[in-house]
Image (spheres, rainbow, N blue to C red):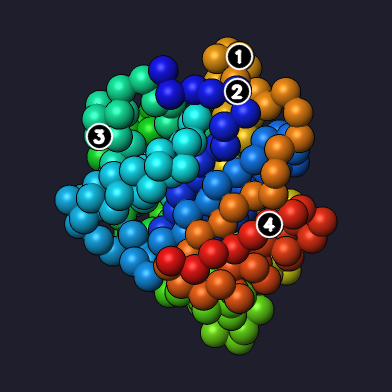
Amino acid sequence: MYSKLNAPVGIFDSGLGGLTIWNELVKLLPREQFFYLGDSINAPYGNKSTDEIIHLSEKNTDFLLNHNAKIIIVACNTATTQAIQHLREKYRGLQFVGVEPAVKPATQNTRTNCIGILATKGTLNSPHFHDTYSRFGNDIESVMQIGEGLVKLVEENRIESEESKKLLERYIAPMLEQNADQIVLGCTHYPFFKDIIQNLVPTNVEIIDSGEAVAKQTKRILTELNALADKPLGSDQMYTTGSKEIMTELAKRLQPNRAIKVTPL
């Protein structure tokens, strides 16, 4: 059992996208202390081989365990689909919470019988994703789109750029042509574009990400383990293999009043 009452919650992602998961965790579990590792130098994971993703995920897990993490959130859809099973087998006794595209709520909520899924190549090509989709989406029409270039735009803090808008218009258009009324954001970087996407779609189209579900699952596991923090802990510690300034800016955009310390690696 790795779990320790007032030890931090560990989070890792291929870069800055996992901050959208951290944001939901902070809302639901404000007393916890979070240690976040953003591996921006290796982003995006979605274009890497399974072996590379497993190697990087092990390295990220070891880093967080060295900081005494009591649970680890794999805040990356690609790392979840390609590596989480391996991590659970290697680090027995340690709880992992992964991020999966929100296919289930999208298929339950659609009124047009069509959903759009925007995700990385690694996620859309993974057996894990196809297993999830086959369980919930077989009777639903879907338009699946690889969001090539979007991760890079978040990593460079060019979220509101013209390039972002043009890419998103191109990726969302085929979904709207097929009358999709649910758009699943299947990469944790993509919720940074939520406002832009909202302006591109009719008001009846719902945009869904997995952040809140991950936070609820994390709270459920920590409650079962009797491992919820029993007092407010210190500031969140964030580590990046990329830009300290961009990580700080994006974290503050999501949680302006949260105490954080960002350290470049």
* N-term-proximal mark, 4 vs 3: 3
Q: Position of residue 177 (x, y in %)?
A: 54, 63
Q: Are marks 3 and 1 in contact (CB under 8 Å)?
A: no
* Marked residue nearer the N-terminal end (4 or 2): 2
Q: Earlier in the sequence, mark 1 or mark 2?
A: 2
Residue 204 appears in the picture as rendered: yes
Left-right relation of 51 to 104: left
Mark 2 and mark 3 lie on one chain; the one further toward the N terminus is 2
Provide the residue designation for mark 2: 5
**Element under label 3?**
helix
- The residue mark sitting in front, 3 or 1, is 1
Q: Which mark is residue 260?
A: 4
Residue behind mark 1: 226
SS for callout 1: loop
Q: Which residue is mark 3?
A: 86
The type of residue carrying mark 3 is: His
Q: Residues within 10 Å of mark 2 (few under 14, many from 20)?
A: some
Rendered image quadrant of residue 238: bottom right
Element class at badge 4: strand
From the viewer's perspective, tell me whether residue 77 is left or right of residue 237: left
**In the rendering, at what x and y percent does residue 185 appear?**
54, 53
> Can you tell which quarter of the image residue 9 is in?
top right
Three-letter amino acid code at the position of disc 1: Asn
Amino acid on which disc 2 is placed: Leu
Q: Give the mark nearer the N terminus: 3 vs 1.
A: 3
Q: CA distance from mark 1 to mark 4?
A: 26 Å
Q: Dot 1, crowdedness within 10 Å: few (<14), some or many (≥20)?
A: few
Indicate the quadrant containing the N terminus: top left, top right, bottom left or bottom right. top left
Point 25% across, 61% down: residue: 48
